[in-house]
Structure formats: C-alpha cells, structure tokens
Image (cartoon, grey):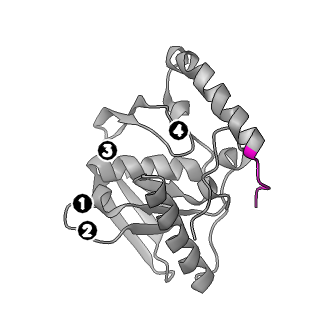
Amino acid sequence: MPHPIRLYGDPILRGHAREVEHFDEDLRAFAEEMVTSMREGAGIGLAAPQVGRSIRLIVVEADAVGEDEEEPRILVNPEVVALSKERSLFEEGCLSIPGVRAEVERPDAITVRFRTLDGKGAEERADGLYARVLQHEIDHLNGRLFVDHLGLAERNLLQKKLREIRERAADASPASS
C-alpha cells in the first residue's frame, strides 16, 4: 500500500532519522510500500521520512542504479564514507517539493556503507546518477533538503513556491511518527 508523500514544511523532513535496529518482515513490507509510493510519485528515490517514518531507510529505482539493474535498491542505515573530489552540477527535484527544480552541485562519486534488508553489512562505490540519488536521499535522513544546497539568491527566487508548498503541507499535516 502506498503512503502519501510528506511535503516541504512537514517537520518530519527536518528531523534526523533513527537507525534501524530490527530487520524483520515489517521492515521488508515497509520497504516494498516505499517502492510503490516512489513509483506512484514517478520518483527515482525515496527516503522513509518522506512517507512519515523517521528511520534510516531509502529506496532507489533500478534504472537510476544502472542499466543492468532490474530491481530497486534498498539501503538500510546508509552512510557516505568517501566522496570524490570531482563535482558537477545537475538539476534535481524532489517528491516532497513538487514543481521545484534547481541545479545542485554534488560529488560525482561516493562510497556508501549500509545494511541490506536482512541486516547484512555492505559497501559499494556509486557514480553518476546513482551517486547523486544516494546523496539526495541520505540528506533526507539527516533532515536536509536539496534546496538547502542552493545559494541565497537561488533560494530567494524559490520562496513563493516553497511558501505555497509549506501551506499545503500544513493543511495536509498527518501526525508524524
């Protein structure tokens, strides 16, 4: 069952998500629900706080991971452990900030350490779109949004749209968990 996407202004998006400690069927079911929510929103990544759960869990659509991938990638308790020095600009958007897009500078490649849904430790290097999506989603787990990476002038240009989204979020505000 899909979950509604929390919008900019919802306090859960600014919190620091807690580590997952129990790797059970409930976690697997929630991860699958997140995949459904991501796909219904036509996104390529989603973090648990965006659907109202403050835990360190992200999902990434298979085509963002690589051409050979068939299943979405699910990362539990992900953390970036290395960043490349090379950086690039790329236009980003966010399911929690609909209608807003902006160029964000991020490292081109990262190494991320995480756990699988079974609780097994893993580490992998990611580059290109996959690295960007991982960084964007891990930011969500730390209460950071892509608009926080923008300069003051860029943020000022977006203030009207962000205020409108914040008002919609206040109107919709389900209780955060």
How far separated are the C-alphas under marks 1 and 2?
A: 6 Å
Give the amino acid at mark 3: Ser
Q: Are marks 4 and 1 in contact (CB under 8 Å)?
A: no
* Residue 147 counted in the magenta span: no
Please determine whether, in this image, residue 140 is positioned above or below residue 29. Answer: above
Q: Which of the image's four quarters has the N terminus?
A: bottom right
**Residue 170 x %, y %:** 76, 39
**94 horizontally vs 5: left or right:** left
Q: Residue at x 60, y 52 (%)?
A: 5
- The segment highlighted magenta reads 172-177
Occupied quadrant, residue 51: bottom right
How far separated are the C-alphas under marks 4 and 1?
A: 25 Å
Q: Secondary structure at mark 1?
A: loop
Q: Which of the image's four quarters has the C terminus?
A: bottom right
Q: Residue at x 49, y 83 (%)?
A: 118
User: What residue does disc 1 label?
Assistant: 66
Q: How many marks?
A: 4
Give the class, few, some or many, for how many residues have Cα within 10 Å of label 4's Cα (few <14, many ≥20): some
Label 3 vs label 4, nearer the camera:
4
User: What residue does disc 4 label?
Assistant: 98
User: What residue does disc 3 label?
Assistant: 84
User: What residue does disc 2 label?
Assistant: 69
Give the amino acid at mark 4: Pro
How far separated are the C-alphas under marks 4 and 2?
A: 27 Å
